[in-house]
Amino acid sequence: MNAWLLISRSSEEEQATVMESNIEALEKRLWSAADQLRAGSEFASNEYFLPVMGLIFLRHAYSRYLAVKPEIEAGLPSRGGVTRPLTKEDFTSRGAIFLQPEAQFDHLASLPDGADRAKAIIAAMEAVEGDYAALAGVLPKNEYQQLENDVLGNILRIFNDPALQNAKGDVFGRIYEYFLTQFADQSAHDGGEFFTPPSIVQMIVNAIEPDHGSVLDPACGSGGMFVQSAHFIERMQQDPTKVATFYGQEKNATTIRLAKMNLAVHGLEGRIEPGITYYADAHELMGKADFVMANPPFNVDEVDAERIKKDPRLPFGLPGVNKSKKVSNGNYLWISYFYSYLSDTGRAGFVMSSQASSAGGEEAKVRQKLIETGHVDAMIAIRNNFFYTRAVSCELWMFDRAKTAEHADKVLMLDARQVFRKVTRKVFDFSPEQSQNLTAIFWLYRGQEERFRDLVAAYLDRAMAEALAGDAAMEPFLDALDGLIETLDEIAPDELTNARAVFQADWDTYVAATKSLGNEWVDGTPVIAELHEGHDDLEPLAETSRDLVKQVDQLFKLAEKAHHDTGGKRGKTSRVKALEKARIDVVDQLKLVRYFHRQAHWLLSRFPDARLVAVPGLVKLVNRAELAANDWSLTPGRYVGVALEEEDEDFDFEGVMRDIHIELAGLNEEAAALAAQIQANFAGLGL
């Protein structure tokens, strides 16, 4: 086999994988505790929302304070044996917030039950605002007076979880975003419109790559576009506070507070101003923005045409105006604004109603003029249920005012409606790998074949590494299985012992093949032919790993039945329980081999030469003549066609059952909420 790149997992990467799962579990546990507390009180979500987000902010600020304080203290100058006191500037330079003693979270968490917690929390918020002018009037204060003292005590205890005390990295930023997501799902504020799901934002960021200069969001909501842009810049090994400036405009005062807290909790600042973008241009960035990103309100129909008809931000004129002199649909106002804000080299990426890309009448005329500029770069169709408050499908629009000459009269059409992961019964998103795979199409479009090859190589690397890690994961399962069989003594059924022997032979063969292949892999820069070869070499291991999963599950079922038939019980400390845990761990490990191999297969099977080609049902590069022949439509599905139906060789029964379980859990939650509401209504009637 030709040499190609193998990147073995470091201990840090393994720890990161563990940490990711721990963070997800922690997010869910904290939310569950906080939401149960709300449900047990008389507070509505909108009353509980801002105080909770404020305490997450304060808890994160304290975590960052503790993380950098020892380093700062070690470097403080001293004179005459007296060390200089800590200052705000010491912490700001390290992306942290200086906290006065009364603003430190341990002070609040340790307050006795008789203390006035609302007063103490308000004093903490005022202390932070006193030190940081950008947060003046932003943090929640009076809202805490509306919550009972014992409720505040419970919330403080929830966010003083021991797992948070040693948290590292952007854990609190993650938790802040997770709570925003959950509150959006409850429409706790502004109908949930303040929040754009992270996977949508990530797709926009990946496509336009906002890595420098002015980043504008004229409908900024809770600031998610800025946060994801900052993460992108950090992945480029740069400091977002030094290379980018974030400008936002938002109509809702409470949402502005959320955005500023969101930025602060991630160590960022932004110039976010109040204003309705239809009538106000707070930052006067027309023709100056390096990047524009937004998720504006869809299909607004009450914009005063008389007030905006001379707006220079509408270079293509007004879309349709009705008899009441109102713009019939505000979608193309937003589209025009985004275009007009861009500098000569600027890029834009934004969410828009799927109706807009093929709208007729005056909107079609605006769209034609826009296409004729040559700056419409790409369109991505997203299936329904990606948003917490919008069940309809949407599309992502991309502008690029510095497109290469070869793409000047072309638009990349990408139909991603068949690419999704089911999160809950009502909400879908992109998995990290799905997002990367769609991004890889943009790399090919821009001639960045090496990035495509590196991604495929990384998937194959990961599949190989997971295969090599299988031996260590299998050992606890086999030990637990053999221990259980020993307890059965001579009455162990032949079916179980025979299956155990067959499995051992199959497993030994798999381990030997894995080690043999792993020993052949060396460092190098892969060319496409070597990637195909690596893919083909790994395929038998990937397929065998799937078969081994089935064997492990069968062994567990046989062992569980034998244990039960001989009078064994299934308690928390039983051998069966230990075997089940080991089974879950090894099955999860084995599945990773096939999973990452399938990601590489997805890319190589569609783009075998690492070149952009039309893929039915997925992607096509469309020229202007074809656009004109289709009424200047920018709807991807109109051009990419329908994918050929493929035989599903990878039907995931457990995945289907998991989806059914998710749906059932969602229905049960709704039923419980409805029952509680009915009970409350009866109680209110005195029945």
Image (cartoon, grey):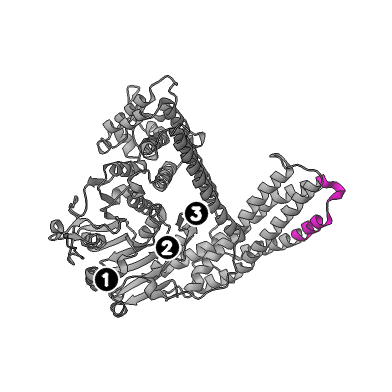
Q: Which of the 4 quarters of the picture holds residue 593?
A: bottom right
Q: Report if residue 5 is visible in the image.
A: no
Determine whether label 2 and label 3 are within 8 Å by CB: no
Q: Is residue 317 left or right of residue 258?
A: left
- Identify which amino acid the numbered label 2 is placed on: Arg
Task: Tell me the element at label 3.
Answer: loop
| Stretch of the chain drawn in magenta | 487-503
Give how far apart the Cα atoms at labels 2 and 3 are: 14 Å
Q: Residue at x 35, y 30 (%)?
A: 146
Q: Which mark is residue 360?
A: 1
Give the percent coordinates (x, y) of residue 227.
35, 49
- Label 1 amino acid? Gly
Mark 3 nearby-residue class (10 Å; few <14, some 14–19, many ≥20): some
Query: Pointer 2 and pointer 1: residues touching (CB < 8 Å)?
Result: no
* Quadrant location of the N terminus in the rendered image: bottom right
Q: Residue at x 39, y 71 (%)?
A: 637
Rendered view: 389 above or below 526 = above
Between discs 2 and 1, the one toward the N terminus? 1
Q: Which residue is mark 3?
A: 425
Query: What separation in Å lies between label 2 and label 1 (alpha carbons)?
Result: 22 Å
Q: Assign a secondary structure to mark 1.
A: loop
Callout 3, which amino acid?
A: Arg
Question: Considering only vertical position in the picture, is 272 above or below 639?
Answer: above
Looking at the rendered image, the disc whose residue lies closer to the viewer, 2 or 3, is 3
Sequence-wise first label, 3 or 1: 1
Disc number placed over residue 383 in the picture, else none: 2
Of all residues shown, which one is farthest toward the right? 490
